[in-house]
Amino acid sequence: MVRAVNAVGEFLKCASRRFRTLHIVSSAHPRLNPPETSNNIDLQGARLPFNRYVVFFALAGVGVGLDLLTKKLVFAQYFDPTKMGVKHWWIDGVFGIETSTNGGALFGMFQGGSTWLAGLSIIALIGIFVWLFVYRMAHSVYLTIALGLVTGGILGNIYDRMGFGFVSSYPEAIKYHVRDWIHFRLNGVPLFDPWPNFNIADSLLVCGAIMLFLFAVFGPGKPKKTA
């Protein structure tokens, strides 16, 4: 997760520089100006449309809600700390359910770091909110969607890292672990045999990060090559 948070931070910096050039670049290159912005938009002073708040909080809310609901249902049905590694296939040998917990970050790194990872996540949440709604980057629907997904993912995992997903029947040692349950593997394919277990929150983080990467590389403000 720490890699995802760091990556989000770098994408935000790059995307911010690109988005702030809209009112300059669009004057000389009108085609670079997306429909949601005007040629003379003032990001600091322009009032945000109400639907940006709706989109952001709806995505974040539905995302974290879906993540927590699936964790609760799956772990209630399948989690048995005495029988770890049991798989329940949806697509035999490729995709299914395997409950596990992770006390670290992506790929099991930083085991035992739940506390400081939770703190880092809180800082990321504050940064996202300020960047979108104080610095008015939510004028971009695209960025609002991307960061709504990221926020839902962060909230889903931070819920576990702070111990709120813990059930009294679980071993005390996993109280601050993230609950994972989606199992995927491609037999014989390096890195994918198997892919580390993940959850809906992780999926939201990855989707949001990919959107931010695409915006940073191909988004408004990137000059087009001319023949």
Image (cartoon, grey):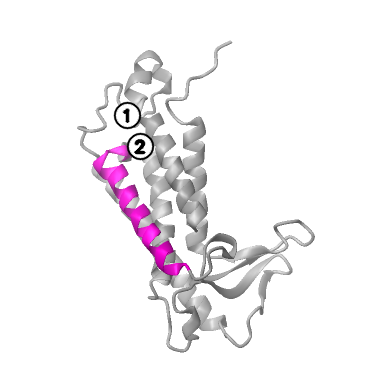
Quadrant that contains the C terminus? top right
- Residue bearing the label numbered 2: 140
- State whether residue 132 is above or below residue 154: above
- Residue bearing the label numbered 1: 37
Q: Is residue 191 left or right of residue 146?
A: right
Number of marks present in the image shown: 2
Identify the mark nearer the N-term, 2 or 1: 1
Which quarter of the picture shows residue 90?
bottom right
Residue 77 belongs to magenta span: no
- State whether residue 209 is above or below residue 103: above
Q: Is residue 156 visible?
A: no
The magenta stretch is 113-137
Q: Is residue 20 left or right of residue 108?
A: left
> Furthest residue to the top?
227
Residue at 63 percent of width and 85 percent of height: 83
For disc 2, the neighbor class at 10 Å (few under 14, some 14 to 19, many from 20) is some
Residue type, label 1: Thr
Return the x and y of residue 170 as percentages of the image width and height. Answer: 49, 85
Q: Is residue 217 left or right of residue 63?
A: right
Residue at 51 percent of width and 31 percent of height: 218
Dominant SS in magenta: helix
Which quarter of the picture shows residue 165?
bottom left
- State whether residue 171 is above or below residue 131: below
Q: Are marks 2 and 1 in contact (CB under 8 Å)?
A: yes
Residue 121 belongs to magenta span: yes
Return the x and y of residue 44 as percentages of the image width and height. Answer: 23, 33
Q: Which numbered circle lies on residue 60?
A: none
- State whether residue 106 is above or below residue 141: below
Q: CA distance from mark 2 to mark 1?
A: 8 Å
Which quarter of the picture shows residue 39?
top left
For disc 1, the neighbor class at 10 Å (few under 14, some 14 to 19, many from 20) is some
